[in-house]
Amino acid sequence: MILIILLTWIYLWFNKRIKGLLLHYFDLDMQFVLKRQWALWCISKQNGTDKSKLKDDEVMFNIKKILKSCTDNPKIIMDENSCDSISFYGADQKGNSLFIKMNHRGYHVAEIILQLILSDGRVYVLPDYPDKTMTKDTNKKWSASGLKIESLEPRQRWRITYNGLLRNQCRGDTSNDDNVEHIRLNFIFIGKSQPLEWPGDWSTFLHADALAREPWRNPDWMHKIMQFGHLEEVDGTVSKIDWTDLKLSDFEKEDTIPMNYKITFTAAGKNYDAIINYTVGDAITCYNGQSCYWACTTRNLHVHLNGSGGIGLMIACCPYTGSKQIKSPDTRVQYLTRPDTFAQKDRYILHFADKQCQNENIVGGKAYSLAVLTSIITDDFIVPQGFCVTSLALERQLQHCKQLQDLINDIIDISRGKKKEDLETYCQKTVSIIQTTSVEEQIKQAILEGLERLELSANKKHVRNLYAVRSSAVGEDSEETSAAGQNSTYLGVKANDVIRCVAKCWASLFSYQSVEY
């Protein structure tokens, strides 16, 4: 078999007349056919060798496979030319779609692409667009610049969250920040019941077809273009794509990519026709400036597969040949950074203007935000004066009431299943005791001094103060927790009622609604 293929190949290679006649009359490229047969034989032989090796040590292989932990965490990158990448694409029938990609590169650098398209035509990208957002990554998780990808079940389910700024492409160019909006995203991505892996789930026939289209000038021909795919039907059946007439050369240059393109392929012995089209001008191109400068273009597609409509995404990456500008380390959007601050243990209140109030672990999310806004010198907005009762004050209040400590420990034990009691009853009892227990004297004195300072400021302006007493939970709306709105808020409070409302805010932390949430 091998000898026949080899002799036929040599004959046709030198007899260009016969080769031309076959191509003209039968549309048959014999050189491609023979290369494909040879590649198919080589792949089958390699797969057979791999299977025989597996069979020889099958027991140890299965044991190692069971013991090996399956993780989706980033791998350690040893050099600047390598990266570990993860990407997600999801769309619904209304035309909303989300594409996310994160690369972990060497030297703890994370590289991010985020593209959100809504059915009303709005397109959101990261503020640094068209450059990919690059940030120094300090951990080994898929988390950077407000984007967090958390594996809930290895290779099955992920939680994808984003809390930060995005640029609305429909509201101006990228040269200013007028089109930058604050966006929060929260998704659960559910994968297939059985992950598909390369090269184990690659069709042998499609592999051979792809290799046959490559020039074979060196021994690396077996590791050339990777062309593979799968088809999932409505009932969940997954089939390997065995053949396709898709030509990579049709998409080499951006200005020559066809608007309407037909792809024919076969899977599980059935023929499929896919017609894809896109709207001119909807392409989004991002650039990244590593040792190799690349342009990554995404296009949202309208797809018709054997008459059924759908949508999809085409990603084309190629070396960027334009002018290469070194990106300034300063991003276009200047982010507020969290200062390194700490509070003394006897500081039971902190005014918004106090730099120590910019410590979220001491004052909670709302107070931290107000403190940061207070530090900004601008006429665009006004932040009312105020102060925060710190978490240190709550700790002192609880330390002076043994009954409260016991009740809170009971709530924790019931929540964890260590104690079988009615959680709601214990929560109600705790709330009642906190509300009726007098605020510890030093804390009360600190609050009264803070109110006096605010009253003096109000008297100078000849206004009468009414106060808003609001809960400010530590960690609310963070990457780890989301508890905003669970605890109490009191508006239009008079000065002599502030301390009572502070106690009620503390109590709401242990309400059944808050604990259950």
Image: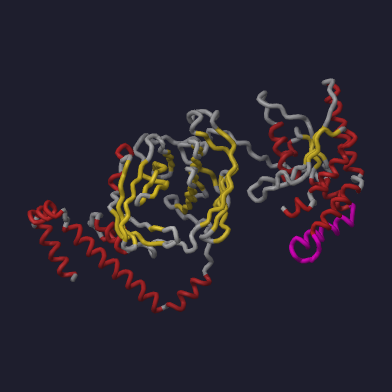
417 relative position to 78: left or right: right
Q: Work out whether residue 303 or residue 240 is closer to the camera in this orientation and state it.
A: 303
Residue 414 in the magenta stretch? The answer is: yes
Residue name at image x 32 percent, y 52 percent: 273
Secondary structure mostly taken by the magenta-highlighted segment of the chain:
helix
Q: Is residue 426 visible?
A: yes
Which stretch appears magenta?
400-422
Residue 404 position by quadrant: bottom right
17 relative position to 221: left or right: left
Residue 105 in the magenta stretch? The answer is: no
Q: Is residue 293 visible?
A: no
What number of labels is visible?
Answer: 0
Q: Where is residue 87 in the image (x, y as percent from the top left)?
A: 47, 51
502 relative position to 173: left or right: right
268 relative position to 441: left or right: left
Q: Position of residue 387 (x, y in %)?
A: 79, 36
Residue name at image x 43 percent, y 40 percent: 286
Residue 50 position by quadrant: bottom left
Q: Position of residue 287 (x, y in %)?
A: 43, 40
Q: Work out whether residue 382 or residue 288 is closer to the camera in this orientation and state it.
A: 382
